[in-house]
Amino acid sequence: MEAKIEKGHFIESIIKEDIKNNKNNGKVVTRFPPEPNGYLHIGHAKSICLNFNMANKFNGRCNLRFDDSNPAKEKQIFIDSIKSTINWLGFEFGTPLFASDYFDRLYDFAVELIKKGKAYVCSLNAGDIKKYRGTLTEPGKDSPYRERPVKENIKLFTRMKNGEFDEGEHTLRAKIDMKSPNINLRDPIIYRVKKASHPRTGDKWNIYPMYDFTHCLSDSLEGITHSLCSLEFEDHRPLYDWTLDALETPCHPQQIEFARMNINYTVLSKRKLQKLVEENHVNGWDDPRLPTLEGMRRRGYTPESIRNFCNVIGVSKKGSRIDMGLLESCLRDDLNVKAPRVMGVLKPLEVIIENYPENLTEELTARNHPQKEEMGTRKITFSKQIYVEQDDFMENPPKKFFRLGPGREVRLRYAYLVTCKQVIKDESGNIIRLICTYDPETRGGNAPDGRKVKGTIHWVNANDCIDAKVNLYDRLFKDENPEQGNRDFIENLNPGSLKELELCKLEKSLINARPGKAYQFERLGYFCLDSKNKDSGDTPNRDPVFNRTVTLRDAWAKMKKR
């Protein structure tokens, strides 16, 4: 089910050259290594698609490996979500792997570095370590503990492992070069004391390895050939290579960096997404306005549309901001093909057809898709009382308004031509009802006398529909780059990003709707049943809740042109 890669990119070219030269015996092994401290977002989808597609394309293997070396932030709920999301995207993996699987081996590697004189226990506190590190323009200076004897380092490191020291009292640092222009090589910390119970190893460990130490060695132990990661790890590559060279590991993977994904009108920083959730600016990690894959799935995004989007944007070394409209276009392309058409009225306006027979309910045939006959037809009903959209009526319509107005004739989709005869208002002057007449000779919407009617509007039978709630979602932020300037990105939130509509009227066939199934509400957009809302699903006596996945056209693009 992987997305087909239509065009090559620089990583694919590197892999092809490696295979040609029989590097790694012609094998390709990649990995996707998320930290289970949150939910995946659309940026992760790019890495997932890249790693799994490269492995699949070259008959290789892609490992799912959880980087669970920071037990204070990691939870089983995140592990379960990540596995489910990768499967939902259409990719298969074997038994999930964990960095914690290698804790014993990593500890032995650390001891080996100490014995080689390439690591030492440092007793500086965090503040002093930072001072000694220097800056981008000034070299660092050696820790006073840098030349501790090997035996003393091993003894102290053992005591760290045994839990004899408090957090921050000692660290294990690689001995590289405090004057290196690359700050990552200025004796980086590779182990720290952390008194935290681990979800998988319990209380066995009082020390945990740092990411840069864990990652490269985990790659090596798994036989990874191409370690594909985002561009912010480019400066970490020398440390990746130094660690593997210092330990003379038999497998030395090649780290290759690519530009991460940035999309306008949203943020993809896990820390910022967490702030949105924890400060209740959104309703949880699966809020359909968020770029989390859980949220996008709940909103109605399809895995095919996300895979296609990742294919379209490609892989490069140069970062850029991608237009949200491109993501939505990929979604529309997919839903246009697969979503059956139904009718729903979001802001109902009652219409009484005065010359239609009393107590008559007529059955009409509607197509489920205008271009796909194989999707078949369905039966809808018509009666004297129907609902149309409030926006489809104007009391004083302009010249190019081809919908309902006093004395105007329009076509009701699949039904008849109707003409508005009277407007009924309440005491406040609000329009509450239209009185219309219909032409019984125009069943199906065509006039036998050949008269032309430009306007066609959708409707539902007031006596044969279901009540529903509908959530209309829009951009989460007002500006293309919410993080631009000195403002807090929270100040850029769009107050109109969610509109909740009550008492919508939907075609009765939607009573059988299930989460994950997309529908096009004709003329209104694509919608799906909300899988998480307490009012959704089979709960008795509750109205279903539908989420608008995306509009039929890019409304924001039209606004920007004005």
Image: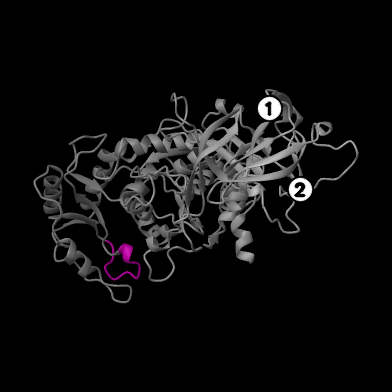
Asked if labels 1 and 2 touch by Cβ distance under 8 angstroms, the answer is no
Q: Residue at coordinates 61% horizontally, 36% vertically from top-left? A: 519
Residue farthest right in this picture: 449
- Mark 1: give few (<14), some (14-19) or many (20+) Cα within 10 Å: many
**Looking at numbered disc 2 in the image, what kind of residue is underneath it?**
Arg
Q: Is residue 65 magenta?
A: no
- Residue furthest to the bottom in view is 137
At x 36%, y 65%, the residue is 488
* Quadrant where the C terminus is found in the figure: bottom right
Q: Which percent across, then down, holds residue 238?
A: 38, 60
Quadrant housing the N terminus? top right
From the viewer's side, name the closer residue of 406 and 280: 406
Residue to which mark 2 is pinned: 408
Segment tinted magenta in the rendering: 176-185
Task: Determine which of the numbered discs, if any, sits on residue 380 in the image.
Answer: 1
For the residues labelled 2 and 1, the Cα–Cα distance comes to 25 Å
Residue 537's disc number: none
Apparent side of residue 161 relative to residue 381 in the rendered image (left or right): left
Whether the magenta-drawn stretch holds residue 183 is answered as yes
